[in-house]
Amino acid sequence: MSIFKAYDVRGLVDSEITADFCFATGVAFARFLQLEREPGTVVIGEDMRPSSPIFADAFSAGITSQGLDVIRIGLASTDMLYFAAGKLNMPGAMFTASHNPAEYNGIKMCLSGARPIGKESGLLTIEKFVEQGSPIELRSVGVERSQNMLQEYVEHLLSLVDLSSMRSLKVVVDAGNGMAGYTAPAVFKGLNVEVVEMYFELDGTFPNHEANPIDPKNLQDLSKAVKKHKADIGLAFDGDADRCFLVDEKGELVNPSALTALIADRALASDPGSTIIYNLISSRSVREVVEENGGTAIRSRVGHSYIKKMMAETGAIFGGEHSGHFYFRDFWRADSGMLAALHALAALSESDGTLSELLHSYNRYSSSGEINSVVDDAQSVMSAIESHYLAIDGVSTDHLDGLTVESSDWWFNVRASNTEPLLRLNVEANSDALMKKVSAQVLALIGGK
């Protein structure tokens, strides 16, 4: 089934994801949890898409048909669902398609303690159970009940970042009509911040722009608003609010690697000598900052299940991805855009200057951002690229995730998309001119469309 992706379930509403499918997936998830000897209660959250409560109802019916109980937490951000699964120590399911357009929906599932479920850790089994169907067994039906977790979620976040004596800040928040419109008011109401709200109305049709802040066009409104209101910082969340992107006081996008380095710096100040995980398309500056501050930096593949697994294995205090996902040991190693935003606010409050000044020391290189090319055979293209660069002195390669090619003053990574016929290129270099030169050279080798 193409809607079972690497880390979650995602597809078009009605044609790919239906109430019947969600019931069958609920049954399959329950069977999987019983195999895993997981607790017998599942926490379910849902975003603001019109189909989410319908699909959550069907999924819950599938779960309870197998004798397991359900706790419905209602409207939630994905990190709020992870909080509930961690705090209650129960498996969970979140109905969301994250940053995808309005016609999509999906399911993110986790084990108790917010431990991730991906293709290699359960999704293939759940998919197989859905395809096979489940035998009808006479058993007692489980019980569904509701529990509001919003206030506990807020209190936990605020217990992890000291904002008690912060200086007054003006913050523009673009919720993109997504779940941050529900969680942000509860988080910010007790803080010394003046919040300028943008698109806080929960609307899964996304009438203003797609809730996908990794695409620069979706940050244009925020950038203008920060400059108009002379704000200190702008925050943009994706649809399920598990990712956060920053805009500085000039209205310019903050490189997510700079935010990773900033939070790593703060984490190491509070827990010296700790381990920090960063994914392999993060800036070299992340590793440098971690090592300069006495920490251990470990490079990871792209993807939350890899980072969370590595954090568990190494005891890492924090992990960051260039895509705007930030993971915290004290948040059950789950990703939270809101917690990342609170760290940024705390750091800005503790500094005397602007956000751009605060981040200057973390912005050491020039990066291309992700460049996508349509290719027919990603593996053969990557092989040709590797052959070309291995003939050049001083160049090394590795295959941790796709192909990474590295020189002393530049590096790039090419990875095949999990879901589309795309090759994804990220380039970083010591100067803007060199970054553009290397990008052009690699794109010429890729060909593509």
Image (cartoon, grey):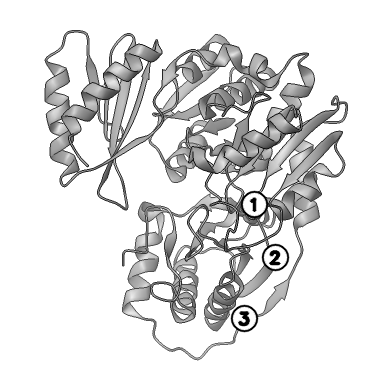
Tell which circle, 1 or 2, labels the residue nearer the N-terminal end: 2
Q: Nearer the viewer, mark 1 or mark 2?
A: 2
Please tell me which residue is depicted at 68% across the width and 21% down the height of the picture. 355
Extreme bottom residue here? Answer: 138
| Residue 301 percent coordinates (x, y) | 38, 35
Q: Nearer the viewer, residue 4 or 385?
A: 385
Q: Quadrant of residue 393?
A: top left
- Name the side, left or right, on which 328 lies relative to 122: right
State the CA–CA distance, disc 1 to disc 3: 21 Å
Check whether the beta carbons of the residues at disc 1 and disc 3 lie within 8 A of each other. Answer: no
Inspect the image, locate mark 2, and give the three-letter code of the amino acid beneath it: Ile
Q: Nearer the viewer, mark 3 or mark 2?
A: 2
Circle 2 sits in a helix, a strand or a loop, which is it? strand
Tell which circle, 3 or 2, labels the residue nearer the N-terminal end: 2
Inspect the image, locate mark 1, and give the three-letter code of the amino acid beneath it: Gly
Please tell me which residue is depicted at 59% across the width and 77% down the height of the picture. 57
Q: Is residue 315 visible?
A: no
Badge 1: few (under 14), some or many (20 or more) residues near its Cα, within 10 Å? many
Please tell me the numbered disc located at residue 86. Answer: 1
Circle 3 sits in a helix, a strand or a loop, which is it? loop
Please tell me the numbered disc located at residue 73. Answer: 2
Tell which circle, 1 or 3, labels the residue nearer the N-terminal end: 1
| Residue 321 percent coordinates (x, y) | 49, 34
Q: Nearer the viewer, residue 321 or 138?
A: 321
Residue, disc 3: 142
Please tell me the numbered disc located at residue 343. Answer: none
Please tell me which residue is depicted at 39% across the width and 72% down the height of the picture. 16
